Image (cartoon, rainbow, N blue to C red):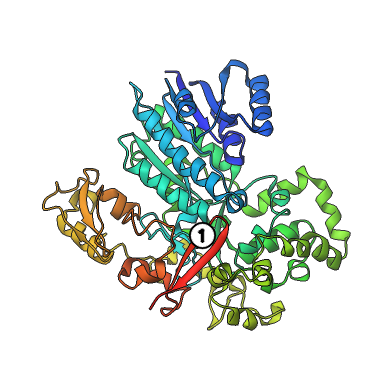
Amino acid sequence: MKVKVALTGASGNMGSEALRQLLELEDVEFVRILVLGTSAKDRAFGAAAKKNYGDRVQVVEGDLAVKADCRALVEGMDYVFHIGAIIPPLSDHKPKATDLANRVGTMNMVDSCMEQEKRPKFVYTSTVAVYGHRNYLHPWGRVGDPLLPSVYDVYAASKVKAERYVIESGLEWAVIRQTAMLHYNMMKANMSDGLMFHTCVNVPLEWVSSRDSGLLVKRIVERDLEGKADAFWRRCFNIGGGAENRVTGYDTYEILLNTFGIEMEKVMKPGWNSIRNFHGLWFADGPALNDLFDYQHDSFKGFCNEILKRFPIYKAAGIVPSGLISKFAFERLLGTDNSPLEWVKAGDEGRVRAFFGSRDNLECLPDSWEGFPVLAKGEIADGNVDYDAMRDIKNVKKMGYLLSHGYDESKPDSELDLADMRDAAAFRGGECLSESMTKGDLYTPLTWRCHDGHEFVARPYTVLKAGHWCPDCCQPEPWDFDRLSKFMPFFAQVWYDSHAREENTEYFTNGRKALYRRFK
């Protein structure tokens, strides 16, 4: 059977790989892509795709924020892969456009699919950023963990809201939360903005390559046509890269720069980076998606070597004095308006508080690597840890890294009942108001009430399995997690890994201006 596939974000790193690999399937009649009509780069990509693939690519020029364009894209399709989004650093500079493209655009895509006589299967690409910040106390996570997007991260906030809309829709859907992505232009992409200094030195990161992500999209269609993907639909998954790609922020810099002959500690200082409020974790449930689709093949180190082969000019960095590389490649970015140290200099107290805790914490930061605890070296502020044991998936349960989801997870889904719903709601500081449910039915909506008294309707899967809670007070902005954690053990178990219980701060924005207020 020949199938028709719609794809957003085709000009991006994951999207372009998805397009290329989908067209390797003989069963795909054509792929219809949406390119931003106001972007010369996107239009050029669409023209090149037509030239390369002929009638097997159809191009729709439009905008995710325009529903008619979304309808034109999905009409008559069998599969829709919604990958397109405004991502950092652009999202940091254009918050309104980000919400329009990511949240409203996803609603337009879902609604357009719902209006089709034959509804396509819908795969939504979300992000690891929905989980927010992690450190050595809980470096491992899984689907169903609390969704605590980092303060002022409008990209993550838009994705939380968008994926909830997908999960609560009447489509045959799947949500895949993408982790940090390796791609060939990652050096160039990260050398124009202070975004790179948002990455905490000790944050856990699990990378995956754009090529493997494209392979995943191909395999979803391939296996589904073979009747081997039933366990995929109406579920959320984390897209990880596997054991070889579990590193930290420090490892990321060191491995990448060492590939080009640069000693990381000679060109960067630990005080340049934020110390919290990023995102990243190792996926305890990462094997689940790979078991279905066998897409994890690239390693972090191997991909870095491929970047060097593709751009041999980077070899020249090995003969350039470290001081010059530091000054002209890295230090120049410290003065950009998206750099943490520039926030300090400019008196952006909201971001200083969110990313460092306080100005006092800044004063305590060592200026050299000698005095800075590096998790990748087995060092933490309290002493030493076994870093290799920590990132071995076999030790996750033994070392107590998994967060509680507030109900009896030893029960199979088919045995979950109203008592489990009530337990989960109580762990989130609220109640399940429904008086009955069919045992094991995770998709018929129930009625819930949060601690603040908001009543809402949501599927049990949305709450217990996907990590969502109240759509009024638990979806930023504002970022009110200090207050919510006082009443929600679900949030508190991880929020206080990197926040003091007495911080009592609510964060919000006015345009790009970062604001906050204290409460008692």
Camera-nearest residue between 139 and 8 = 8
Q: Quadrant of the N terminus?
A: top left
- Relative to 286, is 18 on the left or the right? right
For the question of whether residue 280 can be seen, the reply is: no
Image quadrant holding the C terminus, namely: bottom left
Mark 1 lies on residue: 509
Residue 119, percent from left and from top: 35, 26
At which x and y percent is residue 446?
20, 49
Does residue 520 sit above or below 447 in this rendering?
below
In this orientation, does residue 14 appear?
A: yes
| Residue at (41% x, 48% y) in the render | 161
Place residue 496 in its image quadrant.
Answer: bottom left
Q: Residues within 10 Å of mark 1 (few under 14, many from 20)?
A: some
Three-letter residue code for mark 1:
Thr
Residue at (58, 50) in percent of width and height: 91
Nearest the eye: 151 or 182? 151
Circle 1: element type: strand
Please tell me whether residue 492 is drawn above or below residue 257 in the rendered image.
below
Relative to 368, is 412 on the left or the right?
left
Examine the image and state in which quarter residue 317 appears.
bottom right
